[in-house]
Image (tube, helix red, strand yellow):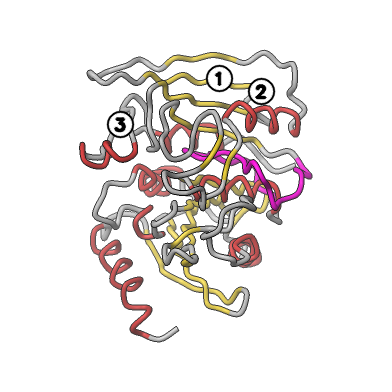
Amino acid sequence: MDMKRRRPWLLACAALLTLDANAASQQPASIASGGVQREYILVTPDAAPPGPRPLVLVLHGHLGTAANALGGGMRPSPLSVWKDIVDREKILVLAPQGLKGSDNQTGWRDCRRDDTNNPRTDDVAFISAVVRKLVAEKRADPTRIYAMGMSNGSMMSLRLALEMRPALAAIAAASGTMAARSDCGRAQYPVSVMVIHGTDDPLAPYRGGTVGKRNGDRGSVLSVEATRDYWLKANKLEGVKPAFFEFPHSGDDATRAIRETWGEDAGPQVAVLTIRNGGHVEPSLRFHYGPVYSRLVGVQNRDLESVEEAWTFFRNKTAR
């Protein structure tokens, strides 16, 4: 890749490093995969106990970048809270960079067979290669690998739950569900899954259907309920009664956040965090999108921190 093409990536990473000079260390890196150099950012704590650490994959959405997901963009990023958890919990965070598809926008090749403009790259192979490298270097614990994605990144995290080796212990899928017409196989092992989704999401419909607002070129997805049922079956939790929790609400918006959880805390487990009247956006206490963005994607709930909910869900789970 020539320097002209690399410059936007390098500038974004430089801005990110400048903004976070006193926080966890963030290192841009690359690895060969599928005949090209694939890029990622690794976030590490300033000091950590010896030995392999838990690793969280953070996957940006369609149009996004790894640097944006970690707080280096123009808009606020609720996913950037992972940097705080790196320092507090002494874990590793890996933010891989998606490539451009036929629409000239960055994204991931998730399981949607009827999507016509996601890149045709093997993103499972790319991400698996980076993870295996960190495991071989004894930096990452192969039994404690997790993923959280937003939108297209959420759908990619669901693909990783089906196909990645080493196996993921748990994922959190924000504003994205399973493909309705899937290129992927069936789940081969238990993976704890949390779904975070607004009932008024205009881009990835809560009840399933066509993704996006255009002519159907973004493919189609299953409903939140069908995604939940898929993983309840895969994790042998069918018939289990869920635990119910409603988050205290503050502010004057119409959203309400409700969490249902199936299974015991150590996993395997399935959780659905429904944002009533919520849009295509991660709930956050700290990072709030403005009114113009909200008109495009819907209302953002401000009663919880999505990343903190994900980490609470992840932290006691190991791959089986």
Q: At 54% across and 33% down in the image, what residue appears? A: 195
Horizontally, residue 66 falls left or right of residue 261, namely left
Identify the residue under disc 1.
260
Q: At 55% across and 78% down in the image, what residue appears? A: 36
Q: Quadrant of residue 20?
A: bottom left
Question: Where is 304 relative to 76, above or below?
Answer: above
Residue 111: % across, % down: 63, 51
Magenta stretch containing residue 180, yes or no? yes
Specify the amino acid type for callout 1: Glu
Question: Where is 20 relative to 206, above or below?
Answer: below
Helix, strand or loop at disc 3? loop
Q: Farthest residue to the bottom: give it.
A: 2
* Image depth: mark 1 or mark 2 in front: 1
Specify the amino acid type for callout 2: Glu
Identify the residue under disc 2.
264
Magenta stretch containing residue 171, yes or no? yes
Real-space Cα separation, disc 1 to disc 2, in angstroms: 12 Å
Residue 126: % across, % down: 60, 66
Specify the amino acid type for callout 3: Leu
Q: Which residues are magenta?
A: 167-189
Disc 3 vs disc 2: Cβ atoms closer than 8 Å? Answer: no
* Image depth: mark 3 or mark 2 in front: 3
The rendered magenta stretch, by its main secondary structure, is classed as loop
Residue 85: % across, % down: 41, 44
Helix, strand or loop at disc 2? loop
